[in-house]
Amino acid sequence: DADVTQTPRNRITKTGKRIMLECSQTKGHDRMYWYRQDPGLGLRLIYYSFDVKDINKGEISDGYSVSRQAQAKFSLSLESAIPNQTALYFCATTAGGKGTEAFFGQGTRLTVV
Amino acid sequence: AQSVTQLGSHVSVSEGALVLLRCNYSSSVPPYLFWYVQYPNQGLQLLLKYTSAATLVKGINGFEAEFKKSETSFHLTKPSAHMSDAAEYFCAVSPMNTGFQKLVFGTGTRLLVSP
């Protein structure tokens, strides 16, 4: 089984709809992240969480919200999806400490029409 | 603030040729540096990382990178490309002076390997 699992893997939704992307990890790490990948832009941080009670905005949080339901679960919501939120979304997790490796899920490809 | 610049959105090599993917960083404090690889329809996987222990870092699949402070570079190399190396490669930076692992990624370089 993968260390970081994202569901769904692919989703097409309509403008204005609410959608949730889910992420769970089995690494036992406290820190979890949501990134968005767009062609030519690399990965940009949407939200990150130190632990269940600590959630922080990243560089592009507008239009998104998150919920950390448990140490192992971190979900990303689009309250009212818009076409420019069409992208590949990645969840990741790291252990505490400096210079540690990030473990990524396989991504969710979201298309907003 | 830190940032990463990857020169060349696409790099094409022949199988067996040298692979060189360029990464330059900007950081106000000593950084950790990483190279990740993304194969089609997959997430990112760590290739190697620099954490100040040694300037020449060896990673998986025959890749290595050299940290050059004077040039603010961390270029990725492999002596002989293989078809299976075709993927997208991301350089990333994280500052050493914080406990929080907040990675800043470059825009990626797609490596194309021809027979």
Image (cartoon, rainbow, N blue to C red):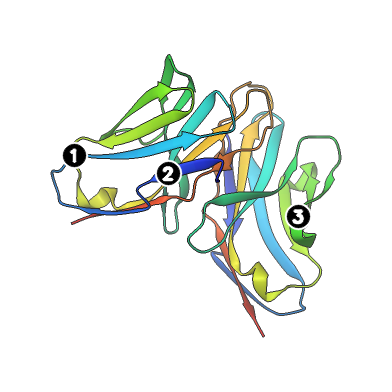
Is A107 on the left-hand or right-hand side of B35? Answer: left
Q: Horizontal and vertical percent for residue A6? A: 42, 44
- Which residue bears the numbered disc 1? A18
**Is residue A58 visible in the rendered structure shown here?**
no
Mark pair 2, 1: CA separation: 17 Å
Q: Quadrant of residue B49?
A: top right
Mark pair 3, 2: CA separation: 25 Å
Toward the viewer: A69 or B111?
Answer: A69
Secondary element under disc 1, as helix, strand or loop, is: loop
Instruction: Please tell me if label 3 and label 2 are on a single chain.
Output: no
* Pointer 1 local density, CA inside 10 Å: few below 14, some 14–19, many at least 20: few
Is A64 on the left-hand or right-hand side of A44? Answer: left
Kindly check if marks 3 and 1 are in contact, taking CB atoms under 8 A apart as contact.
Answer: no
**Is residue B113 visible in the rendered structure shown here?**
yes
Most distant residue in the left direction: A16
Identify residue type, mark 1. Answer: Arg
Badge nearest the viewer, 2 or 1: 2
- Which residue bears the numbered disc 3? B60
**Disc ID at residue B75:** none
Identify residue type, mark 3. Answer: Ile
Q: Horizontal and vertical percent for residue A82? A: 19, 47
Most distant residue in the front direction: A1
Q: Residue at x 70, y 36 (%)?
A: B32
Q: Residue at x 41, y 20 (%)?
A: A55
Q: Quadrant of residue B112?
A: bottom right
**Disc ID at residue A6:** 2
| Mark 2 or mark 1, earlier in chain | 2
Identify residue type, mark 2. Answer: Gln
Q: Is residue A29 above or below residue B40?
A: above
Q: Horizontal and vertical percent for residue B42? A: 51, 57
Q: Is residue A72 above or below residue B110?
A: above
